[in-house]
Image: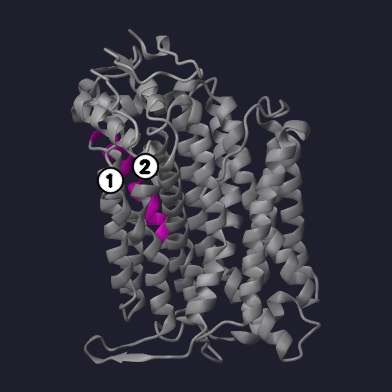
Amino acid sequence: MAVSNFKSEAGQISSNQHDKTTIDDALALAKFGVFNYTLIIIAGTIITAVMLEILSISYVITVAECDLELTTSQKGILSAVVILGVIVSSHLWGFLADTQGRRVVIVSTLFLSFATTVVSSFTSTFMWMAVFRFLTGFFISGPSASIYAYLGEFHSIKTRSRAIMGASFVFGAGCMLLPGIAYLTINNEWAIEVPFLDIIYRPWRLFFVVCALPGLISAIALLKFPESPKFMVNQGDTDRAIEAVQWIHRINSFKKEPALQIKSIVTNANTKSAGSTKGFKAIMQLVWDQTAPLFMKPYLVRTVLVCILQFGTYVTAHGMFMFFPGVVNQIVTAQNAGVDSSTVCEIVHADRPTSGNETVLLNCKQTLEETTYMYTFLADVFYMFGVGLITLVIDTVGRLSVLVFVFALCGISGLLVVLLAIPSVSIWFYLILVLAGFNINVINAAAVDLFPTNLRAMAVSISLMFGRIGSVFGTNINGLLLDSHCEATFWIASIILLVCGVLSFFVPDIHKKAEASISVSP
């Protein structure tokens, strides 16, 4: 007899004996309580940890340039290798999470990413730093690819969206941690000599480790948690799934209620058996079946447009942001020195003149100006409030209006950064330029409606893959051009955004009003 047939006077599902039930109904019986709130906080912290590992380098490349003897092009490479590691490994971790378990992938990769981050903090050369930052990206992709599935599979259909949005809220608050951690850690002047490694351990090295701590703490916390009950059911291990549900119920009821009398859990009719995709050939066939249709009629044009829009958005949102703290710090330093009538690029060229093909450092920065942290903090605050505002108005104004407005506003702002000779104003236009990331989630929401259910997840995954490639492209182009052709970096980013604004009109059915809310993406 199904669980849904058992109702108490209060209208809740009864916890009397149930011979057979689905995993969703079993999770509903376990209730929504302390366990769920704890898991939501841990999941949000893990998403924040991914963000900290990826973006922490944007502060380090500014203050580590003399210790590691970095050129601006090498800074671009260091900014990109973490994301490159994410790109290379994302499908691997997704496959392992689907076959070996979500929890084992999340916990193991969090420990591994912490280890590589700690090692990277002791590196003495650009090459070794690049190697270990790549490995950090390779491993941190594991929890990034699996945490939403793990969180969602501990909740019934009724509470799943609430749980995921709760984790997104925790992530939103966590976004504001980065400039705070950077300010408290980097803006110190202590130095510890480590002779056997031939390095001086400075605050920027400790900053790497501090940014990795949320991931380590989350991994330790998850050691007490079970594997996803839905994954265990899908693997045919219903006994362990029942034990997990019973454990959740004990925590949520504070051990004050009798154990749930669930004898067995039945699988849904549409659940694939665990062995249906075993074998390399079967797996490759499944990947092909999910991917090939996206690049054939009638979906080819939709796929190409969505991928181009994500590529262009990431080129600016991530590519330009990686250099945001460093450039802003140069502007603030110039302002403090009395410069108030130069363009941003004139300040950049003055701070880093070139001699032949080599960029010459005039001075070494071991700390950042306090105002720099304020602007990076404001960028995070504006991003979170902007996502919230877009979520509220997108049903009314439609996706096309949001896409075009954001692309046009950010693209024009990038042009004004180059043209205006008022540094205090140019900083704000640079800040607006990097807020092009607003459109990442809008494009994801549009992609959901552009493709049928069986192709949606793959379509979004491929579009985000192109977005991350755009991030690698943007950071490397900026690293190569910023010192010698500063104006070109802003022109390229701005023109790409304006072109994306025009292409938005060609996305099929883009005029339709949104039917679903936008989720926050790390």
Instruction: Answer whether residue 201 is visible to the viewer in this image.
Output: yes
Give the structural element (helix, strand or loop) at label 1.
Answer: helix
Q: Which residue is at 56% across, 53% downward?
A: 172
State which region is magenta: 82-99
Q: Is residue 365 above or below residue 416?
A: below
Q: Amino acid at mark 2?
A: Ser
Which of the 4 image quadrants contains residue 191? Answer: bottom left
Callout 1: 10 Å neighbours few (<14), some, many (20+)?
many
Image mark for residue 146? 2
Which residue lies under the disc numbered 1? 105
- Residue 459 percent coordinates (x, y): 48, 32
- Residue 204 percent coordinates (x, y): 43, 79
Colouring mode (rainbow / by chain / secondary structure / one colour): one colour
84 inside magenta stretch: yes
Q: Amino acid at mark 1?
A: Val
Q: Mark 2 vs mark 1: which is more N-terminal?
A: 1
Give the structural element (helix, strand or loop) at label 2.
Answer: helix
